[in-house]
Amino acid sequence: MGYIEPAPLKDEENPFEAMMSRFHIASQILGLDDEVYNVLKSPAKQVIVSLPITMDDGSIRVFDGYRVVHSNILGPSKGGIRFDPGVNLDEVKALAAWMTWKCAVVDIPYGGAKGGIQCNPREMSAGEIERLTRSYTSSMIEIFGADRDIPAPDMGTGPREMAWLMDEYSRTQGMTINSVVTGKPLVLGGSLGRTEATGRGVMVSALAAMEKLKINPYKSTCAVQGFGNVGSFAALLLAERGVKIVAISDLSGAYYNANGIDIEGAIAYRNNNKGSLEGYAEVEKIDGSAILELEVDVLVPAATEDVINSHNAEKIKAKLIVEGANGPTSAKADTIINDKGIIVAPDILANAGGVTVSYFEWVQNRLGYKWTGERVNRRSDRIMKDAFDNVYKTSQEYNISMRIAAYVVAIDKVAKTYKYRGGY
Ligand code: NAD
């Protein structure tokens, strides 16, 4: 291979470089040839749009919107839309590539994409967010499509935004096309089980890893960073299976109780407190970043990127990290974590429950039929467990970390498919 020396990581916080360095290692293990390497590392399509929106006070603000289709080799591209002030092209590119690998790891027939708008939805009214969502959809009409590119929620977006997206798209097509987007409200063709799907997959991955490590869930402790969709359901479902959740956190700080936190109570508090744990007085408040360094068996980072990095990796005491968030561990931290003997169920495996149930939603929409929640959970649990076992087996076979093993499984699948399909 002519690409043995990767470009040095200039910036630990650059998620695209972090993704590429893992991609590079896995490609070398697979002995991927240069041609396929170059195809897979380059996003298929990158779209940047300016979205002028009339704000409630009558002023016009222009927002930057992105959609990156990393790959459509395995099928239509799939990936969420993020509304966040930090959204930028590098981040969207990394997240799009992660979607390609994630879909391949869980063996669903999708490529990868991601989108986002640089905005702060917490400071915007519902009307402003609706106009922004519709304007973004209209700008992406040529990109989106049930057989082309299928968006979904991510940070800062949820069923409400997906409903606006579906409606705007359907208007332009002159008919209702609910399979163009997943994560919709139930009445618009959303799937039972979708809301909790990512957290549920984190729980399945955590239990599978604990079994390998011979950790008894009923005697284990866990800290969960991020108490949004992924973190709160992961915490709830793990607690239901006997794991003691001793710490949770969100942007307002971290909350600790050595005897275990009542997760249902914390969720109820958050729901009645504009989505924040601010002021949650049932437990001790600790410094936000301290949650990562607690003496626990399992750590679930379920907030955002690069929270585990070369500055704090050495201080992590958990035996197992189950990555609910995308890219919570920087590439530089990988080595430190591995050297410490900490097992990582990596993001592209552990948080793939969301895209799996998104796939089920799309299948149901296309069938015009609704599955029961029990069927959704049973099938997604099986997919997550099979994917975990496959990645674990690969890590043993090559004597590599679970993270690199997940990339090996994914890249091997996409590369083989590419070779069958061929190019120009
Ligand atoms: P969300 O917006 O529902 O929740 C994010 C939570 O993280 C909030 O509680 C927020 O306060 C907290 N947070 C943000 N930055 C933080 C920080 N620096 N420190 C501590 N807490 C912080 O988002 P979500 O849907 O739960 O997504 C969380 C992560 O999981 C993201 O990385 C996302 O890409 C990833 N993910 C989400 C899904 C999904 O289905 N929602 C699927 C796969 C991966």
Image: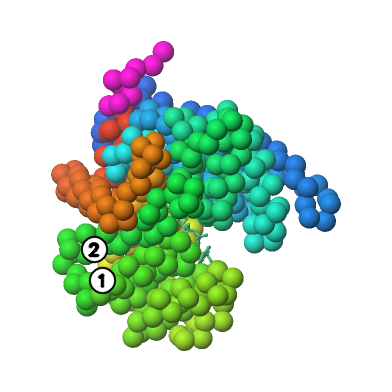
Helix, strand or loop at label 1? It is: loop
Q: Which residues are magenta?
A: 416-424
x, y (%) of residue 67?
Answer: 56, 37
Among the 4 quarters of the image, the one containing residue 29:
top left
Model colouring: rainbow
- Observer-side mark, 2 or 1, equals 1
Characterize the local packing of mark 1: few (<14), some (14-19) or many (20 or more) Cα atoms within 10 angstroms.
few
- 311 shown above or below 408: below
Of all residues, the one furthest to the right in this rendering is 58
Few, some or many residues within 10 Å of mark 2 (<14, 14–19, 20+) = many
Q: Is residue 418 inside the magenta stretch?
A: yes
Between residue 419 and residue 62, name the one nearer to us.
62
**Screen quadrant of the C terminus:** top left
- When the figure is inspected, residue 407 is found, relative to residue 375, above or below; the finding is above
Which residue sits furthest top? Answer: 424
Tell me the CA gap for discs 2 and 1. 9 Å
Which numbered disc, 2 or 1, marks the residue that appears first in the sequence?
A: 2
Is 423 included in the stretch rendered in magenta?
yes
Q: Position of residue 252 (x, y in %)?
A: 56, 73
Q: Which residue is mark 1?
A: 241
Q: For the stretch drawn in magenta, what is the main secondary structure?
A: helix
Q: Are marks 2 and 1 in contact (CB under 8 Å)?
A: yes
**x and y, in percent, of residue 403 in the image:** 31, 49
- Tell me where residue 71 sits by quadrant: top left
- Say the numbered circle drawn on residue 207: 2
Query: Residue at 52% of width from left, 73% of height from top?
Result: 270
Q: Measuring 46% from the left and 61% from the top, which residue is drawn there?
A: 229
- For the residue pair 386 and 23, the one nearer the viewer reads as 386
